[in-house]
Image: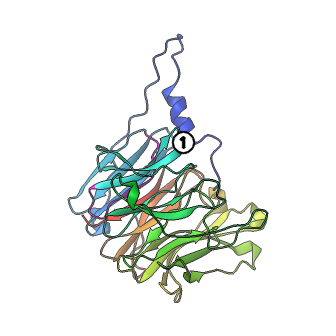
Amino acid sequence: MRALPITTSLLLATLAGCGGSDGSTEPFPLPVVPSLESVNFALLGSGKVAFERISSTGYVAVYVIDATAGTSAHYFDNTVEFGAAISPDGRRIAYTSYNSATLYDAIVSNLDGTNPQHVTRFPAQEGPPSWTPDGTKIVVAGWPANSLVYQVYSQSAVTNPSDQTQLTNFSATPGVPFSCPVIIDNQIRVSISSQGTLAFACLMSEIDVVSAAGSVSASYKPSHADRSHWPNLFAAAWSPDGAKVAFIETTSDVDANLLVSSYAIKVMNADGTNVTTLAATPIAAAANVHPGGGWNGPNNFSLCWMPDGSRLVFTIPDTELIGHLWVVRADGTGLTQLTSAPLVWDRSPSCSRS
């Protein structure tokens, strides 16, 4: 993904400061995290949506919208946490957090950040975690030592290394181009269905469905024949009933610096058939949006299903550094903007039933 010249973590470190102008060691105060702007809770029906908000004015936080209660809150204020995922019961959050020995590891805590449990310790940064539908485990792309690729693992949501299970067996040959299905970076969030089947975007070029036995059971591969309408794929997510996979498809012009010209939410059947566009919007060239968005980190383009399967929540970019959450019904109607604060990028939405 295309990163900012100044990453979010560096921005926060700069704002924290190393001393005042008078030579003191007193750090500069971190930006105040504001409450969520007014949102239409009815757009979500019931349940919760958690998401990460990155502000160009300097703050980072995880916001939670409780549509059932008609309330909102923010947590992890001014803490760089990648890929916050709310548990199916709405009580816990899984995210990746910095560890000096093993870079970013998966952590599970209560929704308010209390009682954190250090869950994974792979030698490189894990991908943003997701939850199994029953809420007992997280699923994460982890990097085994001396490997060229990441593997997908499930792990108990509490510290219990003995129950870690490797779900994939991807391979690669040095000097040979990578080919799907494979995961080669820490930007990928993997979705798992109630049947134990995985779905993820491979190399931004196809959506792969991998069975519990480790074989590819379905895939979606858009045509790459037209350089002026070049597709990239992101954020595969299973529907609650495991019957469909939703994903984001952007279109760019290879000969125009890959600027995104259109953005679509699509769904397909679990077997890869009946690919349908639920919602689409053009992106003006002046917005200067590139595939993956402008902020450093995972899931700049991302989505989730509300637990009853009636709606999807996802990010649509306004510009390279500004994007908001939108909602569309599963039948393709009712495309509506949910969040609207200025100068922010809202990403990595996750949905829970309560």
Q: Measured along the vertical axis of the image, is residue 278 above or below residue 122?
A: below
Q: Measured along the vertical axis of the image, is residue 121 above or below residue 284?
A: above
Q: 71 left or right of 244?
A: left
What residue is at 43 percent from the left and 40 percent from the top? 79
Q: Secondary structure at mark 1?
A: helix
Q: 9 left or right of 139?
A: right
Front residue of 15/136: it is 136
Q: Position of residue 140 (x, y in %)?
A: 47, 60
Quadrant that contains the N terminus = bottom right
In terms of image quadrants, where is residue 67?
bottom left
What residue is at 51 percent from the left and 35 percent from the top? 12
What residue is at 49 percent from the left and 15 percent from the top? 25
Quadrant that contains the C terminus = bottom left
Q: Position of residue 271 (x, y in %)?
A: 50, 87
Residue that carries the numbered disc 1 in the rendered image:
8
Q: Where does the magenta region start and end? A: 79-91
Q: Measured along the vertical axis of the image, is residue 13 above or below residue 28?
A: below
